[in-house]
Amino acid sequence: MAVRNEWFFPRGSLARDGWESVVDAQLPGWQHTGLRVAALDGGSVDLPAGEVERLVIPLSGAFRVEHDGTTTTLEGRASVFDGPTDVAYIGAGQALSIRGSGRVAVAEAPTTVRKPSRYLAKADIPVEVRGAGRDTRQVHNFGTPDALDAAAFIVCEVITPGGNWSSHPAHKHDELVPGHESRLEEIYYFEAAPARGIRAPEGVDAFGSFASYSSQAGEIDTQALVRTGDVALVPFGYHGPAAAAPEYDLYYLNVMAGPDPERVWLVSDDPRQAWIRSQWEQETADPRLPYAAGGIREPEGAAR
């Protein structure tokens, strides 16, 4: 029997109004988070003022963000596998325009709380190497509570080098258990490319894999090969692993928010998999990380 991946969206299937992908409350069953992705070649995209906070994240290239009578220049980066980028937080109630060349993501969350807009320089982005052994991954925490005074969302990005696993062990955040678990719906936006140091032939099909499965909060069953531009949504349930094929690096951008009064990321591991974390104490981190700018990566961008 074929698996129905109802919460998985291949690249382009969420295209709307000049954006390559749009995730918002127009999707049935979705209400707390949003994401927009655009590919620009010197052009611009505009977003109106509203009860929504936003975080502008260059995926590749550089951009100018005009908002509230000011212009913020984002230096950006060559690709998502070249270390952290600078980002711009735009508080609720402000319109903005983004102009530049490359790929840009805008994380969103509806909120009536007004927080001041802020620029976070690349050098100030907290970089975390998480896990150990083949579970090692690199996390850029530019939109987490310790790094950004936002109203509602928690945003970060993860690089998983070829052959490694992340979002592992599988975990969930769909119940309110004070001090232990918070309720957060989550967006995964993926990119994949030949692993650092590999000279790949033209037309490679770079990919990873991602899974989610049911919890008592609801039924979900995602089993997908993921490629650049794909989106997976997690309204509830256990999710993970996200696995990088040995020859390809895997990236994902996470946007989380929920109905709880506290902006906090608290998770419960699948009790059958929780033991895995204790294994990390006996291993060392993958020496390939952290990734910064540089490294062989050919061609630029994966063919579908």
Image (spheres, rainbow, N blue to C red):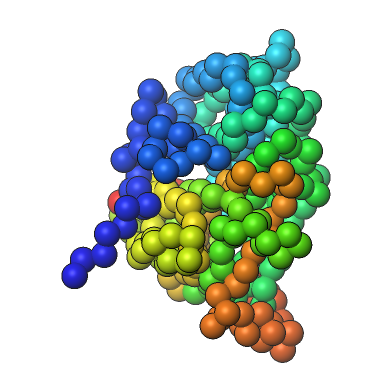
Observer-nearest residue: 243 or 161? 243
Measuring from the top left, give residue 293's x and y in whole percent.
Answer: 65, 52
Q: Is residue 137 above or below residue 18?
A: below
In the rendered image, the residue lying farthest to the bottom is 282
What is the number of callouts on the image? 0
In the rendered image, the residue lying farthest to the left is 1
Q: Quadrant of residue 194?
A: bottom left
Q: Quadrant of residue 153?
A: top right
Observer-nearest residue: 234 or 277? 234
Observer-nearest residue: 108 or 70? 108
Measuring from the top left, give residue 129's x and y in whole percent.
Answer: 71, 66
Measuring from the top left, give residue 120's x and y in whole percent.
Answer: 76, 37
Image quadrant in which the N terminus is located? bottom left
Q: Is residue 202 above or below residue 99?
A: below
Q: Is residue 118 above or below residue 185?
A: above
Residue at the image position 68 percent from the left and 61 percent from the top = 177
Residue 23 is left or right of residue 279, and the answer is left
Residue at the image position 49 percent from the left and 74 percent from the top = 163
Residue 77 is left or right of residue 249, and the answer is right
Observer-nearest residue: 134 or 272? 272
Residue 226 visible, this angle: yes
Residue at the image position 76 percent from the left and 62 percent from the top = 179
Measuring from the top left, give residue 22's x and y in whole percent.
Answer: 43, 34
Residue at the image position 72 percent from the left and 36 percent from the top = 151
Residue 290 visible, this angle: no
